[in-house]
Image (cartoon, rainbow, N blue to C red):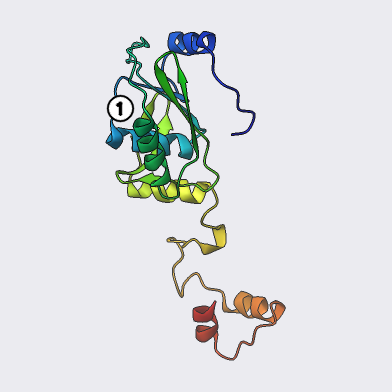
């Protein structure tokens, strides 16, 4: 993590008072299914922290922190597609999972693709995934399909021939040139 510092009890108390939000999620208990979606939601948004052992009111319930638990959480993050970088720390019987903002979005877990919207993790629909991927530049403008273009009505043969000439592409057969491009 960039500029990472260990959280102290004072900072934990402040976060608990502020409550859940875009970058903060409270989980009273460990639930492997829900944890995957929270991890990818943070990775797909701006990163954030998951506090295991804290109820929705921001009160510490505590959680038994074992190496097995830490290992399972690391496995969940590693099994996301692509894997998500996390850091785990223990503060006051609370396990804090710090999720970095992903550099290779979009991320998915076994339940699908999620993003953070305020204090909630929301599953993306097919169309929302396409919009998300286009928005982060994974699909370039010139690779996208223009559904409003009608062939041959909207096609300008002279402009296309001019393009082929400037690109130094042989234009013996316009149909073949279009298919190859």
Which of 24/132 is in front? 24
- Can I make out residue 109 in this image? yes
| Left or right, 106 with reference to 2 | left
Q: What's the residue at 49%, 46% (across, down)?
A: 105
Where 41 sits versus 158, above or below? above
User: Within the image, what quadrant is residue 36 found in?
Assistant: top left
Which of 138/107 is in front? 107
Q: What's the residue at 51%, 47% (across, down)?
A: 135
Secondary structure beneath label 1: loop
Where 129 sits versus 122, above or below? below
Which of 144/81 is in front? 81
Which quadrant is the C terminus positioned in?
Answer: bottom right
In the rendering, at what x and y percent does residue 150 appear? 44, 68
Which quadrant is the N terminus positioned in?
Answer: top right
Q: Which residue is mark 1?
A: 30
Where 91 sits versus 154, above or below? above
Which of 140/100 is in front? 100
In the rendering, at what x and y percent does residue 90 appear? 45, 21
- Can I make out residue 128 in this image? no
Q: What's the residue at 49%, 80% (across, down)?
A: 179
In the rendering, at what x and y percent does residue 49 appear? 46, 26
Q: What's the residue at 38%, 47% (across, down)?
A: 79
Q: Residues within 10 Å of mark 1 (few under 14, many from 20)?
A: some
């Amino acid at each position: 993590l960039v500029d990472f510092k260990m959280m102290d009890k004072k900072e934990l108390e402040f976060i608990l008072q502020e409550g859940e939000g875009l970058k903060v999620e409270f989980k009273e208990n460990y639930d492997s299914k829900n944890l995957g979606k929270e991890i990818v939601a943070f990775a797909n948004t701006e990163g954030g922290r998951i506090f295991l052992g804290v109820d929705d009111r921001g009160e510490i319930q505590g959680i038994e922190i074992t190496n097995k638990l830490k290992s399972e959480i690391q496995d969940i993050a590693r099994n996301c597609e692509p894997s998500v970088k996390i850091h785990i720390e223990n503060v006051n019987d609370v396990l804090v999972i710090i999720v970095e903002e992903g550099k290779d979005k979009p991320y998915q877990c076994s339940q699908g693709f999620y993003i953070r919207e305020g204090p909630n993790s929301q599953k993306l629909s097919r169309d929302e995934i396409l919009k998300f991927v286009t928005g982060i530049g994974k699909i370039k403008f010139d690779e996208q399909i223009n559904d409003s273009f009608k062939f041959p009505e909207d096609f300008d043969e002279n402009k296309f021939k001019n393009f082929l000439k400037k690109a130094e592409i042989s234009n013996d057969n316009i149909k073949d040139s279009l298919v190859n491009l």
